Amino acid sequence: MCEFCMKHGAGKKWYLQAQNYSADRVRGSQRFRDGLRWLLEEKPNESAVLKRRLRLLDLPVVGWAAKRFITRKMKPVHFGQVLTLDEVEKVFGLADEINLFPCMCRRQLTGKRDERYCFGLGSYPREVMEDMPEFVADAQRLSVAEATALARDLERRGLVHTVWTLETPFIVGVCSCRPGECLGLEYTLAGARVMFKGESTFRVDPALCIACGVCEKRCYFHAVAPVSKSGTRRIDPAICNGCGLCASACPAGAISAHARQGPPGNQPD
């Protein structure tokens, strides 16, 4: 179980606890309003800023300190965790309202607004956004069934599902994303973790593996590698982020989910 599970979930999955969706946690909070505007506002130079920061993170000593600083700074403000598709459906069921928006990160990094990857959760954030008509106009209301069907399609397209706080532990949304279009993934893959690994890891059954390599190609986290001359794959549980893209793509059904092992409140980097 991750740190948030211990702090905000009483030892259970924090993102499946109804109290973390309660608007009472943030109602009337100016910090929440400011955070939401910061999250949604246009940042025309974000791509250049990201490139500079990623170069900084590559430096031996300064980069190590910067990674720790970013993680520590973001945890109480805007932090995420990787989800499986089954967990996404459960999260959708806990929200009193689901609104689909054009992907914020994609807009910042590529300038494109043509894809809707961001699921805003809860009626209160939408109420706050009524003061931001430019964002409300982009919203598309979805039912749980519609949102789940879309998330399933996005997973088929190779997008990772993540759940996010705004003014932790209040849960504000689920994002489906991939490298090059997601700030959270870009920072995390560079070692400045702004999202926890999922609470599951995935394993390959060598008796079923057909050595096609699809799972290895689908893994953005480089957790999959061949372990024999036959090409049978293995997933390193310490590296696996628990997204399940490998399992959903496996044509042989050789990959299954298992609860992540480790001390409570701690996840390996």
Image: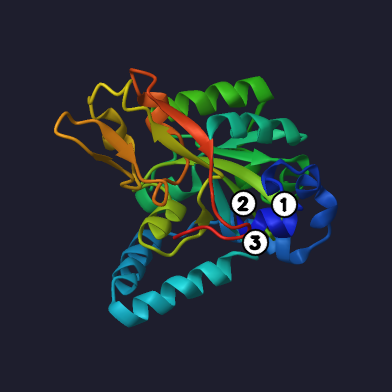
Label 3 secondary element: helix
Q: Label 1 amino acid?
A: Gly
Q: In this view, does 128 lie to the left or right of 79?
A: right
Q: Is there a contact, CB below 8 Å, between mark 3 and mark 1?
A: no
**Disc 1: CA contacts within 10 A as few (<14), some (14-19) or many (>=20):** some
Q: Mark 2 sits on what residue?
A: 1
Percent coordinates x, y for residue 86 in the rendering: 58, 29
**Residue visible at 76% across and 44% down in the picture:** 17
Q: How far apart are marks 2 and 1 (CA)?
A: 7 Å
Q: Distance between the residues labelled 3 and 2?
A: 27 Å
Label 2 secondary element: loop
Q: Mark 3 sits on what residue?
A: 35
Q: Which of marks 3 and 2 is nearer the N terminus?
A: 2
Q: Label 3 amino acid?
A: Gly
Q: Is there a contact, CB below 8 Å, between mark 2 and mark 1?
A: yes
Label 1 secondary element: loop
Residue 159 visible in rendering: no
Query: What is the residue that sits farthest to the bottom in this orientation?
Result: 61
Q: Using the image, tell me which numbered label, if any, was put on residue 11.
A: 1
In the rendered image, the quadrant that contains the C terminus is: bottom left
